[in-house]
Image (cartoon, rainbow, N blue to C red):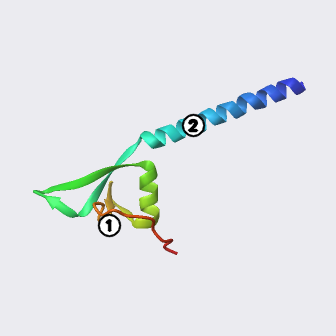
Amino acid sequence: MKIFNSMFEKILAIAFFVIALAFLVVGNLRSFQVYDADTEEFGLESFDKINERSLVIDATFTGTIRKGNKLYSTYDRTEKIGKQPCPT
């Protein structure tokens, strides 16, 4: 019975590892449209496509807000941003 538990635990650990890798890959492949709140050209809103990792960083430190079903940036994305100080 000990061999079965050990083998079962190994299979379960491998399955969780594969699932975690799949979530990481899917998260890196997804992209989101983040609209610029101030820029509107000829009635069209301009947007940038960013990946999920960048969205998490933006929403945490620099500011990305949701209005309806769209994400809007609260800063100028054309400006090069270096390392940011902690906001707290």
Secondary structure at numbered mark 2: helix
Which residue: 66% across, 31% down? Answer: 15
| 1 vs 85: above or below | above
Q: Disc 1 residue type?
A: Tyr
Which residue: 83% across, 29% down? Answer: 5
Name the disc covering residue 21, or none.
Answer: 2
Which corner quadrant of the image does residue 72 belong to?
A: bottom left
Which residue: 57% across, 37% down? Answer: 21
Q: Position of residue 57 (x, y in %)?
A: 46, 58
- Pointers 2 and 1 in contact (C-beta within 8 Å): no
Considering every residue shown, the one lying at the far right of the view is: 1
19 left or right of 64 in image: right
33 left or right of 88 in image: left
Name the disc covering residue 7, or none.
Answer: none
Residue position for label 1: 75
Q: Disc 2 residue type?
A: Leu
